[in-house]
Amino acid sequence: MLKMRIKLAPTKSVHVLGFDKRSADNLVWCAMSYGVSRTFWANGYLFCVEVYEKAFEYEVEKVVFPISQVCYTPYPKYSKVYEIRGAQMLIVDVSEMNLYRTLVSMMKAHERRSGRAARPRC
């Protein structure tokens, strides 16, 4: 029997190219209009992460993961579904995952620095 080695090779860096605070309604409606199937929640924030498929290839080659856009809003209480205009968006609790906890830290720092909502991109 062949011995198999498994090596953990974590991503060295994550590059976020766009980062905006949005209202919950605008964030979810934008996600729906782009065909996103779910949004994320961690530690009091609801957010949408836009990643292009080529980003995964780039991550494998360069060990750097590019995220095109993160839109976020404070959302203190977790719920599994957000309803807007008769449509429902799933919300996944990702608060146990390091990448998303780190993104939430960025959101909190962004809120402290700006204290205002940025203009929506979509």
Image (cartoon, grey):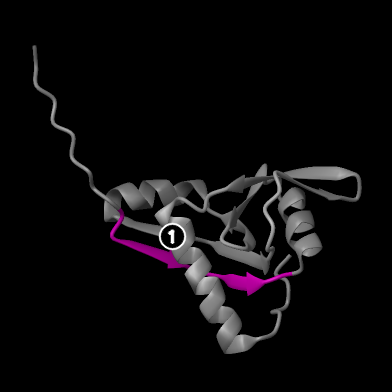
In percent of width and height, residue 88 lies at 80, 43
In percent of width and height, residue 92 lies at 61, 45
Q: Give above or below for 31 relative to 45.
A: above
- Secondary element type, mark 1: strand
In percent of width and height, residue 16 lies at 48, 67
Hey, which quadrant is residue 77 in on the image? bottom right
**In the image, what residue occupies the spot 58% across and 48% down?**
93
10 vs 48, left or right, is left
Q: Tell whether position 15 is magenta.
A: yes
Q: Amino acid at mark 1?
A: Pro
Q: Residues within 10 Å of mark 1 (few under 14, many from 20)?
A: some
**In the image, what residue occupies the spot 13% across and 25% down?**
4
**In the image, what residue occupies the spot 40% across and 56% down?**
98
Q: Give above or below for 117 relative to 59.
A: below
Q: Tell whether position 44 is magenta.
A: no
Q: Residue furthest top?
A: 1
Q: What span is colored magenta in the figure?
A: 11-22
Residue holding disc 1:
66
Pick whichever, 112 or 1, lies toward us. Answer: 112
Pick whichever, 122 or 3, lies toward us. Answer: 3
Pick whichever, 13 or 39, lies toward us. Answer: 39
**In the image, what residue occupies the spot 8% across and 11% down?**
1
44 vs 35, left or right, is left
37 vs 84, left or right, is left
Q: Give above or below for 93 relative to 46.
A: above
Q: How many marks?
A: 1
In percent of width and height, residue 11 lies at 31, 55
